[in-house]
Image (tube, helix red, strand yellow):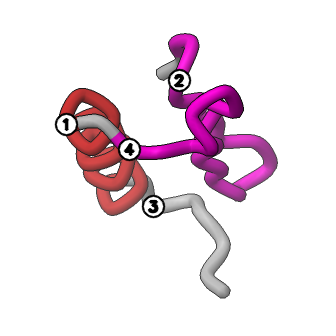
């Protein structure tokens, strides 16, 4: 999942969610929160991620 404000990636068993809205100091919008929620759901479903 990736768009101009949220970058989500899983690489080598590590999930990364990056906020990419520097002109607004990464302030969250409702759409961004929804995208983060979907990304977290994908992380919870993944069985191969490393735990911290």
Q: CA distance from mark 2 to mark 4?
A: 9 Å
Q: For numbered disc 3, what is the local secondary structure?
A: loop
Camera-side mark, 2 or 4: 4
At x 57%, y 13%, the residue is: 4
Q: If you read the primary sequence from the N terminus, does the residue marked by circle 3 or circle 1 appear first?
A: 1
Camera-side mark, 3 or 4: 4
Q: CA distance from mark 4 to mark 1?
A: 7 Å
Q: CA distance from mark 3 to mark 2?
A: 26 Å
Please give the residue where the numbered disc 1 appears in the rendered image: 30
Q: If you read the primary sequence from the N terminus, does the residue marked by circle 1 or circle 2 appear first?
A: 2
Q: For numbered disc 4, what is the local secondary structure?
A: loop
* Labelled pair 4, 1 in contact (Cβ < 8 Å): yes
Disc marking residue 5: 2
The x, y position of residue 7, in whole percent, is 60, 29
Please give the residue where the numbered disc 3 appears in the rendered image: 47
Please give the residue where the numbered disc 4 appears in the rendered image: 28
């Amino acid at each position: 999942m990736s768009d101009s404000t949220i970058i989500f990636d899983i690489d080598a068993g590590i999930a990364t969610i990056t906020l990419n809205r520097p002109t607004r100091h990464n302030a969250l919008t409702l759409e961004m929160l929804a995208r983060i929620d979907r990304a977290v759901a994908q992380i919870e479903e993944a069985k191969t991620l490393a735990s911290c």
